[in-house]
Amino acid sequence: MDRSVQGLAGEGVRSVAEWLGQGAPPEDSRGVRLAPESPLAHFLAAAPWCGHPSAQGWWLAPASGAVRRCVAPNGWSVQAKFYWLKVGDDALVAAERERAYTACAAPLLGAGPYAAVEVYGQWAGVLFLAHVPGPTLLEVIQGQPRAPSAAAPGFLPLPIADGIEAVTRLLARLHGEERGLPAEVSTYDDASYFANYGKKVVANLAKHGVLAPAPALAQSLSRAIDGWQEGALLADFPRVFAHGDATVSNFILPGDGAVVAIDWERARASDPAADLGRLCAEVRHSCDEHLQGAAGVVAAEVVRQVYAATWCGRGDAVSRLLERARYHEGVSLLRIARNGWLSRELRQARCEQALGLLRLRSA
């Protein structure tokens, strides 16, 4: 890292605006114009992977959260993840961690339709990633019309079913047959972490969230989690390289059955059931929100069935993994219930659904 970059990263650069030089305010749907003298424009122009070797004419368009899309005059673009907007002084370490973890995922997924997003590089706490055209799985779910009233209960439109199946197959391939974990992995999950995290989510909901006026439900959830821990039901698992954030917004579907996984910052050495349960909860919630009938339950079952048929494990190993996944699905539903923008009724329903899943192994 050269001295100017060290200065940017270490001397208090904390807003995108400080990288714009004398950029004009937003003028149209493209976003904010980057001034040619801005540090970001100069870095882009000099980067060997850049599709526009000039500091002139760049735009910074909003994407999501801390991510901006840098768009060149010729239409070439790159995603820029501004980690110092997320984690402040830890930006350099966090950006490098996601770069390394994303690079670890690529060979595990191998050649074919399933891939990790390509990383171009990181600079001054900003991670530069390939722009992948196409909708996320969440956008596919949101973009489908509700099923007609005559449709079978739990009807899943074909684009949603295909997308769920493809994402599930990506996770099963990532988790793969047992192999050595990448040396870059520094976070290792164990049974105590899983149980303690579940208890922490319940305590948070009981103190500040939807469970505050429902102490009996909160107590039932806590007892259910205790049952998993006391029975050592979360302890015996194959530790694999896991995505760590298997939400429906972290998988892009470019077409022709392909899937590109993004946001590897929470990757870890973990139980494959943790990724599987998280995806089950996320598709269940999203399909319940945007489709009619029992679509969410059906979607989660599709995930389980496809994973069981695709994952390398056999026999009892698959059965045990599916049971552990129910715990992680339950805890993930509780995570979703923390979202204050959801209605109280929906958040309460997620907690009750979580209890149903957690009781399966604690009764």
Image (cartoon, rainbow, N blue to C red):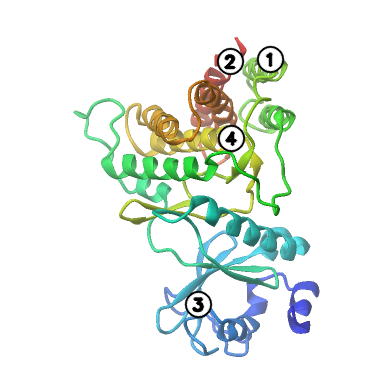
Q: Amino acid at mark 1?
A: Gly
Label 4 or label 3, whichever lies nearer to me, is 4
Q: Amino acid at mark 3?
A: Pro
Residue 82's image quarter? bottom right
**Disc 2 and disc 4: Cα gap in Å?**
16 Å
Q: What crowding class fits label 4: few (fewer than 14 Cα within 10 Å), some (14-19), or many (20 or more)?
A: many
The answer, for residue 12, to whether it is visible in the render is no
Q: Nearer the viewer, residue 26 or 275?
A: 275
Residue marked by disc 3: 26
Which label was assigned to residue 231? 1
Residue marked by disc 2: 361
Q: Residue at x 57, y 87 (%)?
A: 35
Q: Give how far across and how far down residue 163 sits, in percent.
A: 36, 45
Asked which secondary structure carries label 4, the reply is: helix
Q: Is residue 309 left or right of residue 42?
A: left
Asked which secondary structure carries label 2, the reply is: helix
**Disc 4 and disc 1: Cα gap in Å?**
18 Å
Mark 2 and mark 4 lie on one chain; the one further toward the N terminus is 4
Residue 142, placed above or below residue 329 = below
Asked whether disc 2 touches disc 1, contact meaning CB atoms under 8 Å apart, the reply is yes
Mark 3 and mark 1 lie on one chain; the one further toward the N terminus is 3
